[in-house]
Amino acid sequence: MARNITYQQAINEALAQEMERDPTVVVMGEDVAGGMEAPGEDDAWGGVLGVTKGLYPRFPDRVLDTPISESAYIGAAAGAAASGLRPVAELMFVDFMGVCFDQIFNQAAKFRYMFGGRAVTPLVIRTMYGAGIRAASQHSQALYPLFTHIPGLKVVMPATPYDAKGLLIESIRDDDPVIFLEHKVLYGTEGDVPEEPYTIPFGEASVVREGSDVTVVALGRMVLLAEQAAAELEREGISCEVIDPRTTSPLDTETILESVEATGRLVVVDEAGPRCGMAADIAARVAQDAFGDLKAPPRMVTPPHTPVPFSPVLEDVYVPTPETIAAAVRETAGREAAAPA
Amino acid sequence: MPATAPPGTGQLTREQLLEGYRVMRTIREFEERLHVEFATGEIPGFVHLYAGEEAIAAGVCAHLGADDYVASTHRGHGHAIAKGCDVKAMMAEIYGKQTGLCHGKGGSMHIADLDKGMLGANGIVGGGPPLACGVGLTARVKNTDQVAVSFTGDGGSNQGTFLESLNLASAWHLPCVFVVENNGYAESTPPAYHQSGVDVAKRADGFGFPGVVVDGFDFFAVHEAAGEAIARARAGGGPSLLECKTLRYYGHFEGDQQTYRGAGEVEEVRRTRDCLATFVQRVTNAGILDAEDLERVDQDVRGLIDEAVTEAKAGPDPTPAEVETDVYVTY
C-alpha cells in the first residue's frame, strides 16, 4: 500500500527492510548510528540529517559508526563486500570522494575485471550531493560524472521518493559496486511510496512527462526543475518530453534516442559542470547516433565551469533554474521568449 | 636482531618444516625463473620480484586456512604462492594468458584467488590494508574465527590508508594482522630517509595494540611471531603489527638498474642471511630433515616451475572479445 512519505523516509525504509531481509547487509559510515558508545546512544543521531535514524537501535550489530577516516572505511566496505557482506557505506558528502577515491575506483570497481570475473563486490556507497543549501565549494558538488566514467561502477541518482526506495533496494541486491547519489535538497520532498519492498531495474529511464516538440533529459534534482519548465512551456505552446535516466551507468540511451527521433530537438539539464559531464556525454551520443533526426543543435544546461559559490546570490546564479531550462528549450525550438506580462 | 636465532625447530613437525621449505623454495624458484624469463622480453608489463623475502610469506601463511584472507602488494607472488594459489595458473597470468588465474585480465600486479583467500596483489602502494579491515569486519559480523592479514612494504607503511587502517582495526577490535615487509627500499628510497621513527612496529603503540620487530630472513622467528599475532586475532584479541626486516634481492621492478644500492649489498645478505640457506642449515643441524628430504622438494619445485613456464608460454591468449567481459556481474 502506498503512502505519501519523504525521499529521506523512503531511503530509511529501504535500508531497514533490506537489513531485515538479509543479515549480511551492514550500514556503516560517519555518524550513521550517530553516537555509538556516547552518553546519548539511546537517541542516536542517525546521520547528520537523520537519514539513518532508528536503524542503530534496531540493528545494533550491523549499523556501525566509523572514524572520520574515509579511505579506511570505504576500503573496508570493499573488502567486506569481497568477503561475504553487503555493506552500505555512507560517504557523508560526495565531495569527500577525494579522500578515498583510490578505494572506490582502483579497488572496488576493478576487482571483478582484474580478477578475471572471479570476484563479486556487492557494495553500495550512499552519498549526498548537489548545491542549494549554501554549503559552499566543498559540500555542494555534483560529481556523478566522475563515477560514471569508471567502468565497474554503477551510478544511481533517484529524483523521487518512489525511485529512491526501489533503486536503493535494487542497489543493495546488486552484486556490483553501486554509487547511490542522494540530492540533499530532495530529502524533504514527498511522494507516493509502496510500503512493501520493490525494486526498479537499472538502465531504465523514466519518461516523467510526454511531449512532442523537444526532448529534455534531466538528472537528479534537475528533473523537478525540468518539469516546472515544461509546465510553463506548455502554456507557451511548446510540448516537452522530460526524461529522467535515473541511472547514469548503465544509461538508457535507447529511450533518449527514441524520443529525439520523434522530437528532433534535445536539451540536457545537468547539475554537473559543462566539461566531461552527463550533458556533454548525452549530447555527444545523440549527435553521433541520431544526427539525422536532429532539427537543431543539442543544447546543454549546466552550471558554469567554476567551483560552487557560497553567497546565496552567486549560488542561485550557479545552479540551473526552470527559467534557464525554459530559455534553452525556446532557443532549440526556434521560439522567442514570451513577452513579459 | 640476532643473525641466527635459537633453532626453535622443536615446535614444528617434520611435515610443517617440509611444507615451509617447499613454500619458500617454490617462491624462490618462481621468482628466479621470472628474472631470467623477463630478460628475454617475452613477459609483458611490470614484474616485482619477492625473492629474499620468502620466510615472511611462508612463516605467516603457515598459520592461515583457505577461508582466512590476505591482502597483498605489488610484490605479491610470494603471498599468492604461500596462500595456496595455483602456481601454473599464476605463471600463465603473468604471461597474460587465458589460462591465467585471472584469465589474463590482471597480470602480475593483480593476481588474486578469492577461493583461496587471496584478495589480490595490488598495484596501489597502501591499497590493501583497508581491504583487510573489511575482511575483519566480515568475520566479526558473521561471527567466524577468520583472520585477515595485510601485507605492506616499508613504503606502504607511510600511506594514510595504512595508518587509518591501524586505527580502524583497533577501534573496531578487528581480527587483523598487519605485516610490514621492511625490505630496505621504497622503490629507491631507504627507510632511513622516508621513515619517521626507528621501527614501523613502534607505530602500533600509538594505536593501542602490540607491534613487534622480527628478523624477516628467519622463517622460525616469523613463524613464531605470526603464530602469536594470528592466534590472538582469531581468539578475539584484536589486531597486531609485525615488522619483518628483510631485503629484496632484485630491483623495485624487473629492469630496475638499482644504481641506488650499496656495492655488494645483496651478495652479502645472500651469503650470510639467506632465508633458505639458514633454514637448511638449522633443520639439518637439528637432524630433523636431511639433504635427501630437501633435494626431493627442490626437484619437485624445479619440475613444477619448468612445467609452469612451458605451459604458460604455450597457453592460449585471451580472445579479443574478452576485452568486454567480466566488467559487471549484470548490466
Image (cartoon, coloured by chain):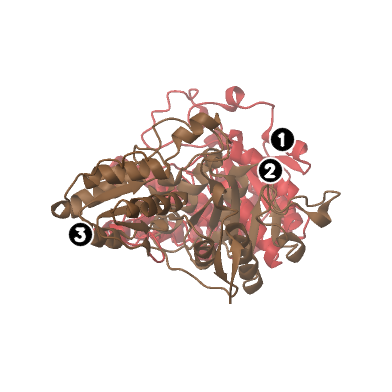
Chain colours: A brown, B red
Q: Residues within 10 Å of mark 1 (few under 14, many from 20)?
A: many
Q: Chain letter for mark 1, please.
A: B
Q: Could you tell me residue A87's position as x and y percent?
A: 59, 60
Q: Position of residue B142 (x, y in %)?
A: 68, 67
Tell me the quadrant of the picture where the C terminus of chain A can be found: top left
Categorize mark 3 by other alpha carbons within 10 Å: few (<14), some (14-19), many (20+). Answer: some
C-alpha span from label 3 to label 1: 63 Å
- For the residues marked 1 and 2, what is the alpha-carbon distance in whole angstroms? 9 Å
Up-down: is B198 above or below A279? above
Q: Which quadrant of the view contains residue A334?
A: top left
Residue A140 location (% of width, % of height)? 53, 39
Circle 1: element type: helix
Q: State how far apart marks 3 and 2 are (Cα).
A: 56 Å
Name the kind of residue labelled 1 in the image: Arg
Q: Which mark is residue B166?
A: 2
Circle 2 marks a residue in which chain? B
Label 3 element class:
helix
| Helix, strand or loop under label 2 | helix
Instruction: Say which amino acid is labelled 2.
Output: Leu
**Left or right of B244: which side holds A245?**
left
Can the viewer see residue B319?
no
Residue kind at label 3, given as amino acid type = Glu
Q: Chain of mark 3?
A: A
In the picture, the quarter occupied by the N terminus of chain A is: bottom right
Q: Which residue is tagged 3?
A: A261
* Towards the viewer: A252 or A75: A252
Q: Which residue is mark 1?
A: B203
Labels 1 & 2 near each other (Cβ < 8 A): yes
Q: Earlier in the sequence, mark 1 or mark 2?
A: 2
User: For the residues carrying marks 3 and 2, which lies nearer the camera in this image?
Assistant: 3
Q: Are marks 3 and 1 in contact (CB under 8 Å)?
A: no
